[in-house]
Amino acid sequence: MKTSYDEERPLVHVIEDNYDMRMEIKDEFKSDYRVIDSENGLVGFEKSIASIPDIIISDIQMPGINGIELCKLLKKDERTSHIPIVLITGYDDEKGQLISLKNGADDYVTKPFSFGILRARVNNLVKTRQLLLNKFLNESHQSQIKSGSVSSHDMLLKKAYEIIDQNISNSTFEANDFARAMGMSRAQTYRKIKVVTGLSVKEFIRITRLKKAAGLLLIGDHNISEIAYKVGFSSGAYFSSSFSHYFKISPTRYVILNKSK
């Protein structure tokens, strides 16, 4: 039976045509990660689109779609462009390693490799993703909208923020509407937003509304009830409780403390 711990563990996708090696890599990560696997690049691409893993480990030398081609496909597809990819390469020279990095790989290990090194590199990439999540949670709405970064993560979030911003006062705008505007299925949108922000789509929309409200409160052109409706809350009381829960302070106190700085 699945537990909340199981669902919260990062999802690793192992793509390797050699069955024994694939099973060894799965065994290495299954204690701390959820693990899915694919036996070739084509299946790996399709399964990555369907599952949106947190990280992908792929061999380079595979029949059909090899690891380099797979990496290119995944990085070009908006649904999977944010996913870190570690390539397992047989190239032990600098030229071969540069091929991996220039084609979108976030890291690589060279055969024969240490499972300890592979695990460390995967762990580091996952931790970097967590830092991005913390950055998202601590940034203001306006700084996220105006971000000039061109990373795949920020490009996705910028598009997401712009869509919500365009519908910010619409209290009926929800996950299905958001997914359609993003051009993805609801399941793909949920997984993509979850991977990048750690939030469900519903939570992401609600917190984005609250961050927008925080900015409007500091401008001071509207009272709290007016701002609640401007950011899509149909109830002033629900807005105040949601704001207090997220910012750990009431809207009124938020204004007083920030204006005194």
Image (cartoon, rainbow, N blue to C red):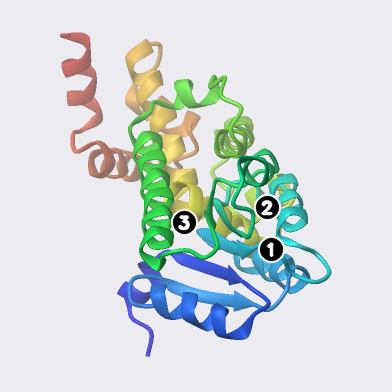
Indicate which label's residue lies in the foreground, 3 or 1.
Answer: 1
Disc 2 residue crowd, few under 14, some 14–19, many 20+, Cα 10 Å: many
Residue 110 percent coordinates (x, y): 54, 57
Q: Label 1: state its secondary structure.
A: helix
**Residue drawn 61% across and 39% down?**
156
Disc 3 residue crowd, few under 14, some 14–19, many 20+, Cα 10 Å: some
The mark nearer the N terminus, 2 or 3, is 2
| Closer to us: 258 or 90 | 90
Q: Where on the picture, by quarter, is residue 221?
A: top left
Instruction: Say which amino acid is labelled 2.
Output: Arg
Q: Which residue is mark 3?
A: 200
**Residue drawn 68% across and 77% down?**
17
Residue 103 percent coordinates (x, y): 70, 43
> In the displayed structure, does residue 202 sit left or right of residue 185?
left
Residue 198 percent coordinates (x, y): 41, 52
Q: Label 3: state its secondary structure.
A: loop
Instruction: Say which amino acid is labelled 1.
Output: Ile
The mark nearer the N terminus, 1 or 2, is 1
Instruction: Say which amino acid is labelled 3.
Output: Ser
**Residue drawn 48% across and 75% down?**
25
Callout 3–callout 1 Cβ contact below 8 Å? no
Q: Most extreme residue toward the right, as rendered?
A: 64
- Asked if residue 117 is positioned above or below residue 135 in the image, the reply reads below
Callout 1–callout 2 Cβ contact below 8 Å? yes
Q: Which residue is mark 1?
A: 49
Distance from Cα at disc 1 to Cα at disc 2: 7 Å
Residue 18 percent coordinates (x, y): 64, 80
Q: Which residue is mark 2?
A: 79
| Closer to us: 70 or 183 | 70
What quarter of the picture does the C terminus occupy?
top left
